[in-house]
Amino acid sequence: MQMKKIFIDTLGCQMNKLDTERILGILSHFNYEQTNDENQADLYIVNTCAIRQLSVDKAYSRLGNWGRIKKEKKSKNLPLPKIAICGCVAQLEKEDLLKKFPYLDLVIGPRNIPQLPELLEKIETKRLVVTDDFELCENKYETKRKKAVNAWLTIMEGCDNFCSYCVVPYTRGRERSRSVESIKNEAIKILSDGFKEITLLGQNVDSYGKNLDEKTNFAMLLKELDNLENINGNYRIRFTSSYPTDITDEVIDVIKNSTHICECFHIPMQSGNDRILKKMNRRYDFNQYKNIVEKIRKNIPDVSITSDFIAGFPSESEQEFLDTIKAIEVLELDYANTASYSPRPMTKAAKMTDVFIDEEEKSRRLNILNEKVKEASLKSNQKYLSRTMEILIDAVKDGVFQGRTRNNKVVHILNSDKDLSLGQFVEVKIKKASTWCLFGEIEK
Ligand code: SF4
């Protein structure tokens, strides 16, 4: 039987990338294969992100393109492709999307992905919106991961924090954790398939296990994953993201004493100012965040701590913005993702319209923030000059192999003429540091 072709476009975070791999895994059991030829698809899916309006607009533009292709095929009496939207925009906009895009066949929420095969049958006769709550999927079908060195693995979904700017609790729902057993089995499978590194994904990994009947928590899960049996050779475990005040001493202790868990925390701070943090509904102030950073640094040598910041949150004054700039410096953060504030539907902050900061000012602050992050990243990289570090090779560009240190620094290998391969662990002496990466040589 001839395989059907699916063209899938993924926008947004790693969670979405992993959802795309899940979709491809499920549909490979139903006679679908991926195509990169947009004109040949039988099924189009855009996997969307609602974190910023720019990303939503991109999704609309994809739907527009595919609508045009469908119209053209109709005019030539050719078989018509199906068009679907999934991810956070689907979850938020539901029926409105069918009204906006008359050629759209299916709107499916991220929690409904396991229902895709039956829904594809149903849309043969009618257009559908399916965004109901659905249990966390204990993958019935294997995820179709792209061959690489690092694999993503969801340990929990959703979030109960309701930060005032964030749409995630409305799109991904409340926190749900997978069982330790199923995560362990998937991790073993991933490593047996040749991956060397696993990144554990969760909106708030420190909440892992809270809703499970079994007595477990994130520290216990990390310990299990540090001690996987029957794995050939070395492997690494990473995780993202952490909520500052939910990081426990037990987690720090497990990482400190582990073999495979990487010394790397991504701890979104969002603002360095206490009043803004309160308005964001974050459950900590600057000093609490600082104490956690200090505790981690004291216990885990060479740890890197990265963060996220928003510039121009509603009502943020110049002085309050400068507190964020100061925080990056005082805390010696290694890197941060940045964005200017973008109002998201359903969130509390989106209603603070009377104190919105204008776009020009937000972009000015974002530029200053980005310059500060550059400076911090260079300073952090320079700490490793002349050090010998273990790197896991994960890419090769123009004949130059590159990899990451345990604390997630990208290192380009200057003497790449050696016999190297992807997935190999090598010791590299750092010779040069730039803003975004390091350069080193394999010794001997
Ligand atoms: S903790 Fe993260 S995912 Fe949860 S609501 Fe806050 S910003 Fe969103």
Image (cartoon, helix red, strand yellow):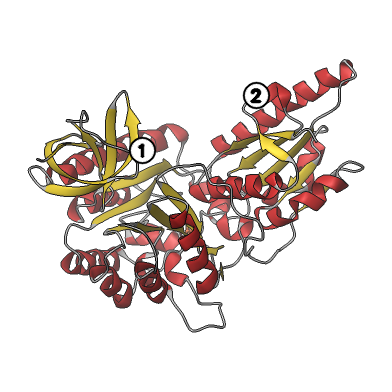
Element type at mark 2: loop
Q: Residue at x 40, y 73 (%)?
A: 224
Q: Residue at x 33, y 57 (%)?
A: 236
**Rendering quarter of residue 123:** top right
Q: Position of residue 30 (x, y in %)?
A: 75, 46
Relative horizontal placement of residue 257, taking residue 90 as reference (left or right): left
* Quadrant in which the C terminus is drawn: top left
Q: Position of residue 77 (x, y in %)?
A: 90, 19
**Rendering quarter of residue 148:** top left
Report, in whole angstroms, how far the alpha carbon at label 1 lies from the one at label 2: 37 Å
Q: Which mark is residue 227?
A: none
The residue to which callout 1 is attached is 366
Instruction: Identify the amino acid type marked 2.
Output: Asp
- Looking at the picture, tell me which residue is in the foreground, 272 or 50: 50
Q: Position of residue 307 (x, y in %)?
A: 33, 52
Local crowd at mark 2 within 10 Å, few (<14), some, or many (≥20)? few
Q: Is residue 203 in sight in this rendering?
A: no
The residue to which callout 2 is attached is 37
Element type at mark 1: helix
Q: Is residue 150 in sight in this rendering?
A: yes
Q: Is residue 397 above or below residue 28?
A: above
Q: Is residue 59 above or below residue 404?
A: above
- Looking at the picture, tell me which residue is in the foreground, 204 or 316: 204
Circle count? 2
